[in-house]
């Protein structure tokens, strides 16, 4: 069964064709990052307009890449929630047009549930192994930070969520404070490799650091607004000389090495700046790792999966692996191409929903917010 998936929840126009849930025939992504970078973030109306311009071309590219025709498609899946409403509506409307013309099933997909499946799209054996459950999933992206328990019957329970900014927002907003360009997460990851993670002591929200009491109901919840505010105040205490510093930082990004400054002050400024970035990233990563491993230990978890755009962060991957090895819990981190927004996870999960009897009518509507995460139908 070949399912064509469409993903337009944010600023990626993505189309994938997946056979029987796991055989990815093609996974095409058209990014709008350069257009939104001019504004320092994603503009919903601009994103929708770009989706309209791109979606037909991306579908044609996917069919060509998979070497099949549109009539070979057995069903169409599309992201219905959550995301930017104008962007979601483009994908949903286009999907409705396709299924109407082809007279095939339509499957609406929850973007968050699909991210969890994205970590398992090339791990079918995990899905089918009863001993892999319960699974705890850390979903970390620009808009969401969640901890979800998945039981063998597919029932899902959200056991932790962010109370303010998502981890991806903390990176992007922190990058803006640090006068880095959008998207800031990958730049922070790259620059942090040259800094001292222990130089600055940024707060770890809701982690009980410095003797701060954490209410029981917040033990697995996240908060990143405090570390962002701390970065802002810390930066105000330093006179970096932004013009010269900016040139040095660009050299680090392009050449992947720390250049020698013209004078000692310039070199020290750069190292101080890199230490601040590394320490900031460490605070965000520490909170994610501590909460996730607490969930693993509390819930007798048999498998840990990590997904979402922030799961590409090299420091997060490194620290989670160390902790998972010590705990002896299998760790599955989604491949980078399935971490960021993509349609393979949409089409792959749709196979399980369709086989389970879940499909939608043409009255399918898009929703910008998550109503609930109750089940991921893997037990078929």
Image: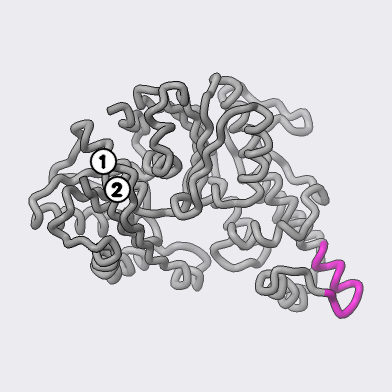
Residue extending farthest bottom: 262
| x and y, in percent, of residue 336 in the image | 50, 53
| x and y, in percent, of residue 378 in the image | 33, 31
Give the numbered dot on residue 51. none
Give the camera-side residue of 372 and 377: 377
Q: Is residue 74 left or right of residue 330?
A: left
Q: Is residue 366 left or right of residue 104?
A: right
Q: In this view, does 3 lie to the left or right of 237?
A: left
Q: Check disc 2 and report the residue beneath it.
A: 347
Residue at x 70%, y 69% (from the top left corner)? 256
Q: Main secondary structure of the magenta part?
A: helix
Q: Is residue 191 left or right of residue 311?
A: right
Q: Check disc 1 and report the residue beneath it.
A: 351
Element type at mark 2: helix
Q: CB under 8 Å between callouts 2 and 1?
A: yes
**How crowded is the residue under tag 2: few (<14 C-alpha within 10 Å), some, or many (20+)?**
many
Give the camera-side residue of 361 and 367: 361
In the image, which residues are magenta?
260-271
Q: In which quarter of the image is residue 112?
A: top left
Give the camera-side residue of 121 and 54: 121
For residue 178, say whether it is visible: yes
Above or below residue 229? Residue 355 is above
Residue at x 35%, y 29% (from the top left corner)? 374
Above or below residue 4? Residue 152 is above
For residue 97, say whether it is visible: no
| x and y, in percent, of residue 357 in the image | 18, 32
| x and y, in percent, of residue 60 in the image | 24, 67
Element type at mark 1: helix
Residue at x 65%, y 59% (from the top left corner)? 188
Indicate the quadrant containing the C terminus: top left, top right, bottom left or bottom right: top left
262 inside magenta stretch = yes
């Amino acid at each position: 069964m070949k399912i064509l998936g469409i993903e337009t929840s944010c600023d990626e126009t993505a189309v994938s064709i997946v056979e029987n849930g796991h055989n990815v025939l093609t996974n095409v992504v058209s990014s709008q990052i350069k257009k939104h970078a001019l504004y320092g973030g994603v503009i919903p109306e601009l994103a929708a307009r770009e989706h309209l311009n791109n979606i037909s071309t991306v579908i044609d590219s996917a069919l060509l890449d998979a070497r099949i025709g549109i009539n070979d498609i057995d069903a169409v899946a599309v992201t219905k929630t959550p995301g930017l409403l104008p962007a979601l509506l483009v994908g949903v409307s286009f999907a409705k047009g396709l299924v109407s013309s082809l007279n095939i099933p339509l499957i609406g997909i929850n973007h968050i549930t699909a991210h969890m499946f994205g970590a398992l799209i090339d791990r079918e054996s995990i899905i089918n192994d009863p001993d892999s459950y319960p699974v705890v999933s850390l979903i970390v992206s620009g808009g969401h930070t969640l901890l979800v328990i998945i039981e063998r019957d597919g029932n899902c329970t959200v056991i932790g969520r962010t109370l303010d900014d998502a981890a991806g927002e903390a990176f992007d907003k922190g990058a803006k404070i640090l006068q880095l360009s959008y998207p800031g997460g990958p730049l922070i990851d790259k620059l942090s490799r040259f800094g001292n993670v222990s130089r600055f002591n940024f707060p770890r929200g809701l982690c009980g650091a410095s003797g701060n009491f954490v209410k029981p109901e917040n033990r697995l919840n996240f908060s990143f607004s405090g570390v962002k505010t701390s970065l802002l105040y810390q930066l105000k205490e330093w006179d970096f000389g932004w013009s010269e510093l900016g040139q040095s930082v660009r050299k680090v990004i392009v050449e992947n090495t720390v250049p020698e400054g013209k004078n000692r002050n310039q070199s020290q400024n750069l190292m101080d700046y890199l230490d601040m970035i590394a320490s900031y990233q460490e605070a965000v990563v520490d909170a994610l790792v501590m909460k996730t491993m607490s969930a693993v230990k509390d819930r007798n978890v048999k498998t840990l999966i990590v997904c979402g755009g922030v799961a590409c962060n090299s420091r997060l991957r490194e620290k989670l692996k160390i902790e998972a090895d010590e705990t002896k819990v299998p760790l599955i981190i989604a491949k980078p191409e399935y971490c960021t927004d993509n349609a393979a996870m949409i089409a792959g999960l749709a196979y399980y929903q369709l086989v389970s009897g879940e499909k939608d009518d043409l009255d399918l509507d898009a929703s910008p917010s998550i109503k609930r995460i109750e089940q991921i139908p893997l037990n078929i």
